[in-house]
Image: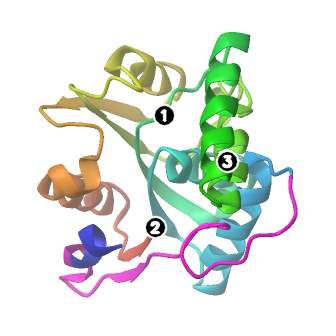
Amino acid sequence: MKALGPLARGGRHVVAPDLRGHGDSPTPNGPWSIDDIASDAARVVSSHGGNAILVGQGLGAAAALAVALGHPGLVAGLVLTGLSPRAEEPEGRERWDRVAGALRERDREGWALATEALGGRPDWRGALSQLSAPALVIAAAHDKAMPAAHQRELAVWAPRARFLVIDSGRDVFTEAPQVLRSAVTRLERLESLTAVAA
C-alpha cells in the first residue's frame, strides 16, 4: 500500500499484505468471516516475528482487531480507522449484502466475500475489555459510512485506547498519512517498538 511507504523511514520493517480476495492474494471459496481474514493476517505477522503494530482501515481494521483479540502475543499496538465495535443491525447487514451483490455483478467475488464478512462481523464491545495492546482510533470527521461517534466506542470499551477525530474524508491512509505516521510513532514510544505490520 503506497500510503504506508513513508512508515519504513527510521528503520521500521513494514509489511503490507493484500488481504484474501484482494490484489495478488488468493480468493478461497466462501463464505468468509472476519476471523478467517484475521487468521491470514496472524500468519503473516507471526512469520515476521510478531511484536507488531497493526495498522488497519475498514476491513483491515476489523482483521487487525480480531488478531489482537485472538492472538494477543503477536500484537504490540493497533492503529484503527473506519471501524465500529458493534455488530451490524439487520438493516446494516442488508446494505452490506447489497454492496456484495453489486460487486459480484462486476466480477469481484473476493471483494464481495470480504464485504459480507465485514457486514457479518461480531460485536466486540464485551471482548474489548480484554484487549491488552495499546490502540489509537483515528476517526475521519467526514466519514459518512462510519461516523466518528460509532468509532469512538472502540476507545470507550478498550482500556488502553485513545481516540482522535481528524479533518479528513473516509480514506485516512491517503488523505492524512502524516497522522498515520504520528500514530505509529506514538505507539513506538509507548512500547519501545520498531516493528510495524499492516
Which mark is first along the chain, 2 or 3? 3
Front position in the image: 151 or 127: 151
Front position in the image: 169 or 101: 101
Q: Which residue is mark 3?
A: 66
Q: Residues within 10 Å of mark 2 (few under 14, many from 20)?
A: many
Disc nearest the viewer among 3 and 1: 1
Which residue does the image show at 29% across and 46% down from the upper left? Answer: 171
Residue 77 rendering spot, x and y as whole percentages: 45, 55
Q: Is residue 27 left or right of residue 18?
A: right
- Given the image, on which type of amino acid does mark 1 rest? Leu
Mark 2: secondary structure: loop
Residue 162 rendering spot, x and y as whole percentages: 34, 32
Q: Which residues are magenta?
A: 6-30
Which residue does the image show at 57% across and 60% down from the upper left? Answer: 75
Q: Which residue is mark 2?
A: 198
Which residue does the image show at 60% across and 36% down from the upper left? Answer: 99
- Given the image, on which type of amino acid does mark 2 rest? Ala
Q: Which residue is mark 1?
A: 83
Q: CA distance from mark 3 to mark 1?
A: 12 Å
